Image (cartoon, coloured by chain):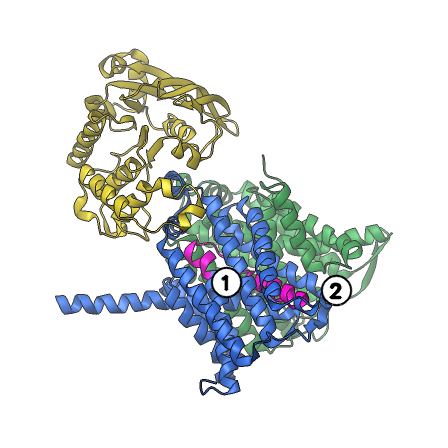
Chain colours: A green, B blue, C yellow
Amino acid sequence: MLYVELLAQGLVQGSIYALVAVGLTLVYGLLRILHVAHAGLFTLGGYVGVLVTNATGSLLLALLVAMVTVGIVGMAIYRLCYQPILDKPPYVALIASIGLFIAMEEIYRLVFGPYGISFENPPLQDVVQMFGVTLRLGEVATAAGTLLLVGALAVFSGKTRFGTAWRATVTDPAMAESFGIDIIKVRYLNFFIGSAFAASAGVMVALLNNMVEPTMGSVPSYKALAIIVLRGLGDVRGTLVAALALGVIEAFGTIYLGKFLDRDAIAFAFLILVLMVRPQGLFGRA
Amino acid sequence: MLGLGAYEISVITAMGIAVIFALSLNLITGFCGQISLGHAAFYGIGAYTSALLTKAGFPIGVGLLGAVILAGLVGIVVGFASLRVRHDFLAITTMGVGFLFVGITRQMDFVGGEMGVSGIPASGFGKPGFMLFVMLCVVLTILFSLHLKRSWMGYSFDAIASDEDTAKVIGLDVSRYKLAAFAMGTALAGLAGALYAHNVRFIDPESFGFVESITVLAMVVIGGIGSVPGVIFAAALLSVLPLWIQFFDEYKLLLYGGLLFAMMRFSPGGMAGLARRIIPSKAKGARS
Amino acid sequence: MLLDVSAVTVRFGGVTAVNGVSFSLNKGELLGFIGPNGAGKTTMMRAITGVVTPTEGEIRLLGKNLTTLPVHQRVRLGLGFSQQLVKPFRNMTVLENVALAAGARHTASPFSALFRIKRDREKEQAAQLLAQVGIADAADADPSNLPLGYLKRLEVARALALKPSLLLLDEPLAGLNHAEAHKLADMIVALNRAGQSIILIEHNLGEVMRICSRLIVQDNGNKIGEGDPETVMNTAVVRAAYLGEGNDHVAA
């Protein structure tokens, strides 16, 4: 039973990584920027989620508000921070992104205080029995929400005209432009969707921990960055699989390796190991 | 000695160590254009190595040497792993190494776990003597940096920092050059870490976390990526500001973050770039 | 024989970009490599320079098998090339760009590069090369401020600084106006007369027909013609390939 329990925990945790990693993958695929400040958007999502829930009592409304607000902030970051430095060497955007991320965390600390805020009436805390495992409703909602969002993304990118243009642009921006696709519009869309996904993950983590704090973005986002490295030059699907796999590996690793490494170190030990053995990434072709 | 009080001596020593640490990252990030987000881990490896060696009874010389060698070796392993993926992923793998280092030192009892290592032997040169020793290391590090910049290795690093693919087109073995930069930079960080350990005589995992990695990156970026005088100036300044201005400590990270962003967005050359922009424009103005 | 390309095939996913192409080059030749847009010329060149690895086939330079070597090793074996999109090192002057390539023997190993400082000889060589390609006046300029015509020549000078046994020029005339292209083509001829073996990948048919002694035509990844320019361009299959694209290039 322990195994099933660990698997379930790992998948829930992996869902969070997946939602964060999707946005990063999209930005990296399109602009070749390692968008570290994505972590700050995740945290912002968590704060908006808790604040709106406390004000209105509706978690669903809070989720929507968080996704839309953070999506718009994400587009603003692209326009104000990345677009002017796209033609500079790659380290310029990377360092700018790191600086932005750290400044965001500090702003949350100064505005909302260092100890974080919680839900007044924590929603979805009831416990349910599923497949012989005991889960909180919040955990079930996290997994279900991820499935729903990722499914919606798959339908959007697979079935709509804009989705097709989007995929074409991620694959080959120059080629897409020559077909008359407005790549600037695609970039905005990219940042909106990626940031909204990060915000949803932020709300879910707030729900699972009943807590948001200024530094909550660091760890999931570093892991999401690691996932981008691990998946090779795959696609969104590869990212999802890698994210879920990482969640599960961590869940089991904590039990068996906990004496030597803490949870966060396991992910990176795994990352370094994979890079040594399979440099093309977990799913890349040799 | 030299008319300096104990406080001035400790400030100068700390500044010197920060300068060595910043110049070590400058070899990797400044000269070779590779971003490391986990440089504090190598600083920490140096600190722990020398602390444990000297506590076990070895002389400080062995401690320092061990720190340099172990940090450099780990650096080569990490560099080797990172070189096998896309070049901008070095930032992520080094960030991972930073986490791994803190994770391992926290969990392992023989390096003190959460409690860290205390009672690290002092240098044995006395406080003023240690300050002079640190200054000697600073001077040697500066001379080495300046030599490297002028050598054909520095010339090749310039090319790699500008455009890796084109560097290959003129026959440069980009991977070996990057590995060389990484080995030298991490070994030097190990030295800085060892000096730090013998200066403060107490270390714990938190002294070598992400914040330290960002602080040293801020020193390099704010000083001016690749500019030796710029990085020395920024390292000296940023290492003493928190001591002098209490309120700075509270807003330190906000300032570092803001400056990292603002420098890249508006002046990727850092303070050195700003200085270059102001001075030649004056000269031109005088001529016209 | 200087370069021997035998039965090279390059596939990406399901697409065959180059399909079993063979050709060779003798010392001192100026070979034109042409084809309509999307013919797989650039892919063929990338297979020679090492940016892509052929799925099948073999590439030999002076008898040495290059097929799986990384780019920098091919360069060390005597392959020099200019890139289609100009890529100067923007953090150094034009002269320094060329001098670094001229010092290739000092940069073979990072360790020995650390112990060498003097660059006077390489700077002199670089200055001569800049004069040879006609941009001596820009020696101390920042490449970011130069027009395309200068940067195209800088690419050529930098490749020449490696003293390559084979010089590969990937669309050096693209983006230049008629007079500039004519001038650069004359310079290529002069280089060739001085003994430099050259492969010229070009879209500008007029200049290629004027200066090359031999042509290879590729279309849809297949070699469809080889021989002296007049004869090759008059074969039915080559005319069809170009007419299919619109005959503006034949007219040019």
Answer left or right for A85 relative to B279.
right
The residue at 46%/32% (across/down) is C52
Where does the C terminus of chain B fall, quadrant-wise?
A: bottom left
The residue at 28%/11% (across/down) is C235
Numbered disc total: 2
Q: Picture coordinates of residue B109 (x, y %)?
A: 76, 65
Q: Secondary structure at mark 1?
A: helix
Of residues A233 and C243, the one nearer the viewer is A233
Furthest residue toward left:
B288
Quarter of the figure with residue C129? top left
Answer left or right for A125 relative to A233.
right
Can see residue C130? yes
Q: Residues within 10 Å of mark 2 (few under 14, many from 20)?
A: few
Q: Secondary structure at mark 2?
A: helix
Residues beneath discs 2 and 1 located on the same chain: no
Of residues C85 and A64, the one nearer the viewer is C85
Kind of residue at badge 1: Ile
Magenta region, residue range: B26-53
Of residues B189 and A173, the one nearer the viewer is B189
Chain designation of label 1: A
Q: Which mark is residue B110?
A: 2
The residue at 60%/52% (across/down) is A226
Which residue is disc 1 drawn over? A98
